[in-house]
Image (spheres, rainbow, N blue to C red):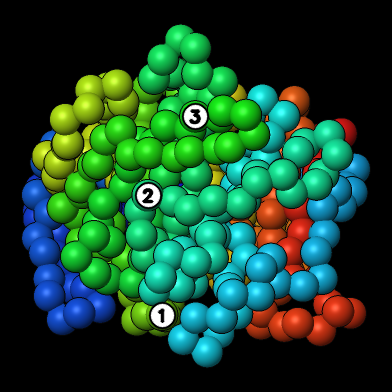
Amino acid sequence: MKRIISLFLFLQFYVMVWSQTMTIDFWNGSSQKYNMKDIEAVNFSQGDEEDEDLGVPPELICNVQTIVEHYHAIDGVVSDGALTQWDQSMAIYNDKIFVFLDSSAETADGGGYSFVVIDYNTKEIIFKGLMPSKRSHLNNAQFLDVFYDENDAYPLLLMSRGDYPSADSNKFYIMRIVESEGVFTISIVKTITCTLPQANYNGSWICDNSRGKLYLYTMLLGDWRIREDEGNRFVIYEFDMFDPLDSSDLTLTEDDMTRMTKYDYWVLQGGTCSGGKLFLPIQNYTKINGIIPSYRGHIVAIINPDTGKVERIIPTDSMENEGIAIYNGKIYVSSKNGSGSMDTKTPVFRIQEFIMID
């Protein structure tokens, strides 16, 4: 009888979604109505703890080792009284690890830098440079599988801002990396603007290169500082991927969205996609699949975007997860000490390698 009641409530939810508009109130006092008629909406925050299909996902067992670790700020540049931020996102290709920093730490005269390149084999920093998107949080970075020029050593880069609200915080970019004699130059190929209010703050983007899908993952109420008991949730919006080689600027709207999946309350960071699954490093969370898990540390959540279910989790260390990349069949997670301490006993930046066993 209980399962029959649960099925009835589940179907009732879908009837409600498909027959009504949904109004969302945002952090800045504004609100927006969504016409859900043409959008596939899935809610996985309502899981019954006894529902076998929404259980706590098993841990993905991995061998873990730290491959890069620094005990001091990357350059010591001081801006507005604070040390330069370490990493916010990471992408790996052609034996080069690109680490992107919060570029709000760039100095007014153009000093400092907002990305570094680390040699994958030696683990040494080989270059430091500036991004073309000034004053950007650079919350997520991911390589696509499309090259701007057949002679380029790196495919195009999908770069998210994830800023506090500003005139440009609802924008993200397609970027080109050119390497010449050890110098790395990054330029903007295409600027994309998303009109969804959720893209205005903390929003980041992932591409499923194999299936031509684009995902915006963000907070339902547009601000992670609005807590769970106020109705906030983690949410993923799905779009069809556009042509990254078309240099004309693009605007994505609610009409372009093909699916919305709502989850429990998480504080999210970077993300990537492999094998049709989303890999999201999570800083902290309240529940997974509607259930409070026994493991309460930081994790990487592995999500099936077709079902919306968290299928596996990877426990990570106590530092703040930021970037993630999958390279040579291994998972790499970059993290930082959020305090920005110069204490040489505490690492401020770390990259860990996870070799999947089970």
Q: Nearer the viewer, residue 90 or 187?
A: 187
Disc number for residue 178: 3
2 or 1: tag closer to the N-terminus: 2
User: Please, what is the three-letter code of the amino acid marked with disc 3?
Assistant: Val
Q: Position of residue 263 (x, y in %)?
A: 44, 57
Label 1 crowding class (10 Å Cα cut-off): few <14, some 14-19, many 20+? few
In three-dimensional space, the C-alpha distance between marks 2 and 3, rounded to whole angstroms, equals: 13 Å
Q: Nearer the viewer, residue 142 or 314?
A: 142
Tell me: 243 left or right of 356: left
Q: Position of residue 304 (x, y in %)?
A: 52, 36
Mark nearer the viewer, 2 or 1: 2
Tell me: 95 left or right of 133: right
Circle 1 is placed at which residue position?
A: 225
- Describe the element under mark 3 as helix, strand or loop: strand
Which residue does the image show at 15% across and 81% down from the upper left? 29
Figure quadrant of the C terminus: top right
In three-dimensional space, the C-alpha distance between marks 3 and 1, rounded to whole angstroms, equals: 38 Å
- Describe the element under mark 1 as helix, strand or loop: loop
Q: Position of residue 202 (x, y in %)?
A: 38, 63
122 w.r.t. 210: above or below: below
Label 2 crowding class (10 Å Cα cut-off): few <14, some 14-19, many 20+? some
